[in-house]
Amino acid sequence: MKNQFLLILCFLYTVLLLQACAPVLVAGAATGASVANDRRTAGTVLEDQSIELKASGAIQADEALSKSVHVSVTSFNDIVLLTGQAPTRALRDQVLEHVRSTKKVRGIHNEISIENPTSFNTRSNDTWITTKCKSTLLGAKGLEATHIKIVTEDGVVYLMGLVTRQEGDTAAKTVQQVTGVQRVVKVFEYLD
């Protein structure tokens, strides 16, 4: 009787453990599919994530800077896009220095505007615009939406990726039609 109880207990414990693994397996499969469809190598994808973490971490570690600015660091193929706001040129330059000192950065597109940081509502709206743009690109003919990274800042949509000129033009024209998009900036690396 005692052995049977232990067997049932072990079975239930195993089932619970497997259920906890399910989200990890699903997330891993989705990431694997995304990397498999990416034009960057798996190593470059990881390096881009590392660049974003290190540069953002350096900005956040600078207490005076992190309290004064709103900056997003996005890396694609070792090229960094900086978006957001800094109240002064000196603060913007400090952000640039932190990013420049990050290893493996091949280039920087500085789109930080000199103004006070945007509100939470504006940032929430930017997230919504990004979601709508991604959804719209999924349905675009002649375009693989996973080849394009979308960043929205204060209604301006930035498009990054390794694309052909035709793909880049198609993506920009498609995204421009999304409600709320004020302007589209192409920050692509072209394959042709």
Image: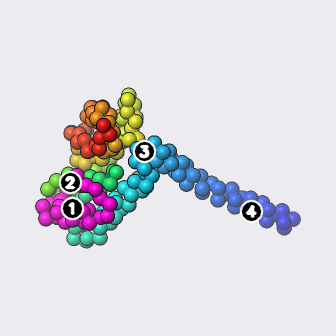
Q: Label 4 neighbourhood size at 10 Å, few (<14), some (14-19), many (20+)?
A: few
Q: What kind of element bears circle 1?
A: helix
Residue type for callout 1? Leu
- Label 1 to label 4, Cα distance in Å? 55 Å
- Label 3 to label 4, Cα distance in Å? 41 Å
Residue type for callout 2? Asn
Residue 16 vertical position relative to residue 122 in the rendered view, above or below: below
Residue matched to label 2: 110
Pointer 1 or 2: first along the chain: 1
- Label 2 to label 3, Cα distance in Å? 24 Å
Residue matched to label 4: 10
- Label 4 to label 2, Cα distance in Å? 56 Å
Residue type for callout 4? Cys
Mark 1 vs 2: CB contact within 8 A: yes
In the rendered image, residue 177, in percent from the top left (x then y), is placed at 27, 32
Is 19 placed left or right of 192 in the picture?
right
- Quarter of image, res 58: bottom left
Is 44 placed left or right of 182 in the picture?
right
Q: At 45% across and 42% down in the image, what residue appears?
A: 37
Residue matched to label 3: 38
Q: Label 2 neighbourhood size at 10 Å, few (<14), some (14-19), many (20+)?
A: some
Q: Nearer the viewer, mark 4 or mark 2?
A: 2
The one nearer the camera, 74 or 113, is 74
In the rendered image, residue 56, in percent from the top left (x then y), is placed at 31, 62
The residue range painted magenta reads: 85-110
Is 164 placed left or right of 184 in the picture?
right
Residue 70 vertical position relative to residue 136 in the rendered view, above or below: below
Q: Is residue 30 magenta?
A: no
Pointer 1 or 3: first along the chain: 3
Q: At 68% across and 56% down in the image, what residue appears?
A: 15
Residue matched to label 1: 96
